[in-house]
Image: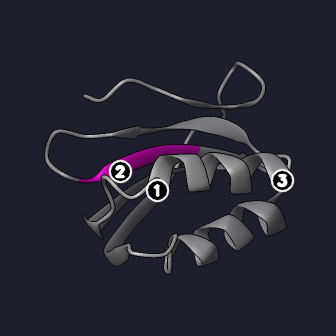
Amino acid sequence: MIAKHVFLAGRVQGLGFREWLIRGARELGLAGWVRNRHDGRVEALIAGEADAVEELLRACRFGPPGSEVREIAEDFAEAPSEPGFARRPTV
């Protein structure tokens, strides 16, 4: 199991990006969370089997229709203590 803390920049808010990411994470059996940031980025913690985490991160490079992901910053992180994948409030 691995966990990644991710920041996505570009046109990533107001397009259903968080819901798209939640659906993808749940389909892959991943844990973690996603939220918007006031600076216009989307932030996420994605944890699970390495192949599934990497698959979701590859999909994030394209995002849902209408999005334009210009930059992804990722780093290894501690896995979340709670199961499932959730939306968190904007910070």
Q: Earlier in the sequence, mark 1 or mark 2?
A: 1
Label 3: element kind: helix
Is residue 43 on the magenta stretch? yes
Q: Which residues are magenta?
A: 41-45
Q: Position of residue 12 (x, y in %)?
A: 33, 62
Residue at left 66%, top 35%?
79
Cα separation, mark 2 vs mark 3, equals: 20 Å
Above or below — where is 79 with respect to 83?
A: below
Q: Earlier in the sequence, mark 2 or mark 3?
A: 3
Q: Position of residue 22 (x, y in %)?
A: 64, 46
Give yes or no for contact between labels 1 and 2 (Cβ–Cβ under 8 Å).
Answer: yes
> What numbered label is drawn on residue 17?
1
Instruction: Decide which of 52, 14 is in the foreground and name it.
Output: 14
Amino acid type shown at disc 2: Val
Q: Quadrant of residue 9?
A: bottom left
Cα separation, mark 3 vs mark 1, equals: 15 Å
Label 2: element kind: strand
Is residue 53 on the magenta stretch? no
Residue at left 39%, top 75%?
66
Residue furthest to the left in view is: 39
Cα separation, mark 1 vs mark 2, equals: 8 Å
User: Between tags 1 and 2, which lies in front?
Assistant: 1
Label 3 crowd bin: few (<14), some (14–19), many (20+), radius 10 Å: few
> What numbered label is drawn on residue 27?
3
Label 1: element kind: helix
Q: Position of residue 15 (x, y in %)?
A: 38, 58
Overall secondary structure of the magenta section: strand
**Residue that carries the numbered disc 2 in the rendered image:** 42
Amino acid type shown at disc 3: Glu
Label 2 crowd bin: few (<14), some (14–19), many (20+), radius 10 Å: many
Q: Earlier in the sequence, mark 3 or mark 1?
A: 1
Label 1 crowd bin: few (<14), some (14–19), many (20+), radius 10 Å: many
